[in-house]
Image: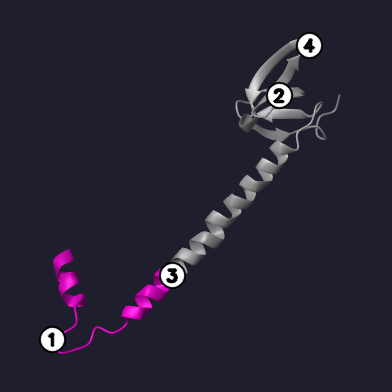
Amino acid sequence: MNFLTFVLQAQPAAGQQAGGGWSMWVMLVLIIVVMWFFMIRPQRKQQKELQKFRDGLKKGDKIVTIGGIYGTVVEIKDKTLLIEVDSNVKLKVDKNSVVKDFSETVQQ
């Protein structure tokens, strides 16, 4: 069965009302609500938590960057951080590149 035959069979016969136009809109709205509830809402919540974490950074916090660099925060500015990755080796990184705090998980 080809696509044209399927489309022609789906059309209502002459004189009959198509009906169910409102049900299409209801289904469309339901799909959008479900997508928002399961995809967009959790992502926004995660982004807010990450931004709160970045704003709450303080000197001495142990962090991980997006690139996988482990370090300790030495200095904090508006948009950047100075982190110490090894004894006397410091890197300046963007604040948005910090993704994780591992202060509690590291045993020294």
Q: Which residue is the extreme one toward the top?
A: 88
Which quarter shows the N terminus?
bottom left
User: Considering the numbered disc 3 on the image, is that residue within a helix, a strand or a loop?
Assistant: helix
Q: Which residue is mark 4?
A: 87
Residue pictured at 18% horizontal, 64% vertical: 3
Residue count near mark 1 (Cα–Cα under 10 Å), binned few <14, some 14–19, many ≥20: few
Label 3 to label 2: alpha-carbon separation: 45 Å
Residue pictured at 51% horizontal, 65% vertical: 34
Residue count near mark 4 (Cα–Cα under 10 Å), binned few <14, some 14–19, many ≥20: few
Mark identifier at residue 61: none
Label 2 to label 4: alpha-carbon separation: 13 Å
Residue 28 falls in which quadrant of the image? bottom left
Q: Which residue is mark 1?
A: 14
Q: Say which of 67 and 60 sits in front.
A: 60
Q: Say which of 13 and 85 sits in front.
A: 85
Q: In the rendered view, does 13 fall on the left or right side of 24?
A: left
Q: Indicate the amino acid at tag 3.
A: Val
User: Considering the numbered disc 1 on the image, is that residue within a helix, a strand or a loop?
Assistant: loop
Is residue 105 depicted above or below 87 in this figure? Answer: below
The location of residue 90, given as percent across then percent down, is 71, 14
Task: Name the N-terminal-most of marks 2 and 1.
Answer: 1
Q: Which residue is mark 3?
A: 29
Task: Name the N-terminal-most of marks 1 and 4.
Answer: 1
Mark identifier at residue 70: 2
